[in-house]
Image (cartoon, rainbow, N blue to C red):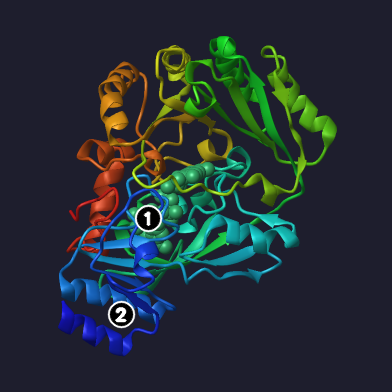
Amino acid sequence: MSATLEALRREFGGDIIEPGAAAYEAARSSILVSGSPAVVLRPKDVADVRAGVRFATRAGLPLSVRGGGHAFAGFGTNDGGVVIDLSNLATVEIVDPERHRVRIGGGATWGQVAAVLAPRGLAISSGDTKSVGVGGLTLSGGIGWKVRKYGLALDNVTEAEVVTAGGDVVRASALEHPDLFWAIRGGGGNFGIVTAFEFTAHPTTDVFHGRITFPAAEVPGVLRGWADHLRTAPEELSSIVSFANPFAGGPEAPIEIHVVFDGDDERLAAQALDPIRRLGTVLEDDVALTPYADTLVDGVTPPPGIQLVTRSAFADRAAVPAVLDILAEVGASQRPPFIAVRSVGGAVSRVPADATAYAHRAAELMFATTVAGPAPVIDAARPGLEGIWRRLAPHTSGAYANFLASATEEDVAAIYPAPTYQRLAAVKRRYDPANLFAGNHNVRPQ
Ligand SMILES: Cc1cc2nc3c(=O)[nH]c(=O)nc-3n(C[C@H](O)[C@H](O)[C@H](O)COP(=O)(O)OP(=O)(O)OC[C@H]3O[C@@H](n4cnc5c(N)ncnc54)[C@H](O)[C@@H]3O)c2cc1C
């Protein structure tokens, strides 16, 4: 590799970080998984990204592309390979104030986006955490606090600048390279490095944001009531329910309904939220008018040695009662996983299933189980988790790529229904025939 690396030094303007360098310790790992790459490249512009891609091909080493570094499966690092870390490509620029068009560097985080958009009264429906990358979240979906009103993050992308495996820079939009544009909206990092996204942002006011909590004993009724309400509630309301939180008592932990009502009209917010308050015995209710940017929380990096095993699936309308009953039962069991259920539907379900490579448009809910701890704790929990997911399997559909800590063939088959996968494989063959971009839920070239 050394001769290839010497050649790279002549054309690469960004940082080249090798083992032994002061910056290596921080650069080698992603947020949730540690790694020991042979070299980390931190490009400063698109020319560097092209040079980095050509270098990875010549070096013949595995390549990881790192956006915000939050993938549960640790895609942002590797052992012995090349990491292209996009964190210096983080410019956020309003390029068309009239149409609210925003150009965002492929390595920006949602906190950086909110910092630029909030003073202009704009927002993009994204996730709930500042440190999560725009790249990873958007390329596989993006279920955030305004998802029912504005859809997934990827539904708001209008074009992207992509460096392909061949080192070419192409623009993907409805008009240019439409096959690539379709594929990157759901197909993850399989098709190239997105050096910039263009999004349509939406005007935002302050929003009603907070948590309404109920006793653990009321989980079954509260869960069902919540899901029923979300079905007909105004799309301004997006919500996440979490329970069995191991840091708050596990099976004894209160059930928390996190809400954002997208608007500042107190009467309308109350109309949307009061039915939730009537679902049971309210323990706490801290819902308050909040600047949208302040609804995003800082991400937490787990201490070294702590692993997070997250698994997810979707529930369509007919499956919701059975799925929620099982989850309620699991939450009340001994040492349950942490369970979170997110509302989708609304604007997400108005997009045809084949319009983007994210196909789970009919789902009402996306839910995830998470176990956190050192390796022995994870190993001890695995059989129980398998049992839970075996019970859920007949009722669930698919998996949400962004909440998966593994990347098996079954995972990939769950993320992409067969027709989606076939179409992605054809696009992959065109833009990455040698499967250079394999550090992801991998689609093999057809
Ligand atoms: C604390 C936390 C909170 C979260 N909250 C939410 C949430 O509210 N909603 C939600 O939908 N998801 C959420 N997620 C999941 C999140 O969307 C995924 O973890 C996502 O993969 C993170 O993207 P990243 O860029 O930070 O990660 P990375 O690990 O850097 O990247 C993830 C994948 O995307 C690829 N990639 C990243 N950027 C680019 C790019 N510019 N071009 C090409 N490929 C790229 C990488 O190669 C990798 O395969 C959360 C995760 C965590 C850990």
Up/down of 328 relative to 337, above or below: above
Task: Kindly identify which residue carries mark 2.
Answer: 51
Task: Kindly identify which residue carries mark 1.
Answer: 30
Numbered disc in front, either 1 or 2 = 1
The residue type indicated by label 1 comes to: Ser
235 or 308, which lies in front? 308
Q: Please report the residue visible at 33 percent of the width from the left and 19 percent of the height from the top.
A: 388
Up/down of 98 relative to 136, above or below: below
Q: Is residue 293 visible?
A: yes
343 or 172, which lies in front? 343
> Mark 1 and mark 2: span between their CA atoms?
22 Å
Q: Earlier in the sequence, mark 1 or mark 2?
A: 1
Q: Please report the residue visible at 62 percent of the width from the left and 47 percent of the height from the top.
A: 296
Q: Residues within 10 Å of mark 1 (few under 14, many from 20)?
A: many
The residue type indicated by label 2 comes to: Ala
Quarter of the picture holding the N terminus: bottom left
Q: Quadrant of residue 381?
A: top left
Q: Please report the residue visible at 37 percent of the width from the left and 24 percent of the height from the top.
A: 396
Q: Which mark is residue 425?
A: none
Name the secondary structure under disc 1.
Answer: loop
Q: Quadrant of residue 262?
A: top right
Name the secondary structure under disc 2.
Answer: helix
Q: Percent x, y for residue 364? A: 50, 28
Q: Percent x, y for residue 201? A: 63, 57
